[in-house]
Image (cartoon, helix red, strand yellow):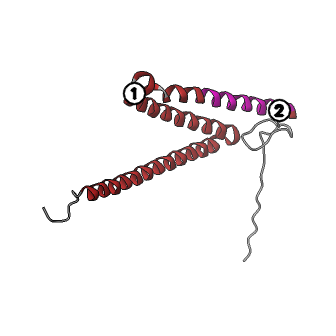
Amino acid sequence: MEREYKIIIKADNVTDNKRQPIAQQEEATAESVKKTIGAVAVYQKAKQVIGSEITYIISTVSLRTGQAEAQQRAEFLYNIGQKTWNMAENIAVGFAVGNIAGAVVGAVTSMVSTLQNYLHAANTISLQKAEESISLLMRQERAGVANNGNR
């Protein structure tokens, strides 16, 4: 016994052929694309210059004040701010391209990137600890203080 199914796709809210299904936006003209690309290029360059200036100011905190802890705190806060801003950018771009689903994808990609950065940092710290431990043990052996069971 065969059954016949029909799939009908309608776009009732479309009034003309200029509408696109992705993000329900008007068809982009060449002029609007040029303006958008120009704005993005200016934004990215400005972000780079401002980020470079902030990084310089933060990296010289301990030289100017003698407080290494203050520099570490400033670096930590800047990194958190950067990650938050990047996530907001990804969500905004995702929303512009694909509505809510695109925004969710933007948020997820930011979280995955942040998690990857944390895992890399944890691995680096672990490697540094292992190297420091080996180096300390070698110094102790050279000095004759290594614990070899005899006192």
Q: Calculate the distance from the C-alpha at mark 1 to the C-alpha at mark 2.
A: 44 Å
Q: Residue at x 39, y 30 (%)?
A: 68
Could you say where residue 150 lies in the image, as x and y percent from the top left?
A: 14, 65
Q: Mark 1 falls on what kind of element?
A: helix
> Which residue is tagged 2?
34
Which dot, 1 or 2, sits closer to the camera?
A: 1
Q: Is residue 147 left or right of residue 15?
A: left
Can you identify the residue that label 1 sits on? 70
The residue positioned 42% from the left and 27% from the top of the image is 62
Residue furthest top in the image: 65
Q: Secondary structure at mark 2?
A: helix
Query: What is the x, y in percent for residue 145?
Result: 21, 56
Task: Please check the rendered image and state whether residue 56 is part of the magenta-colored stretch, yes or no.
Answer: no
Magenta segment: 31-51
Report whether 49 appears left or right of 26: left
**Left or right position of 130 against 51:** left
- Identify the residue at image location x=30%, y=54%: 139
Name above or below for residue 16 compared with residue 6: above
What's under tag 1, amino acid-wise? Answer: Ala
Residue found at the very far bottom of the displayed protein:
1
Estimate how packed mark 1 is, as few (under 14), some (14 to 19) or many (20 or more) residues with alpha carbons within 10 Å. Answer: some
What amino acid is labelled 2 in the image? Lys
Occupied quadrant, residue 130: bottom left
Towards the viewer: 70 or 94:
70
**Quadrant containing the N terminus in the rendered view:** bottom right
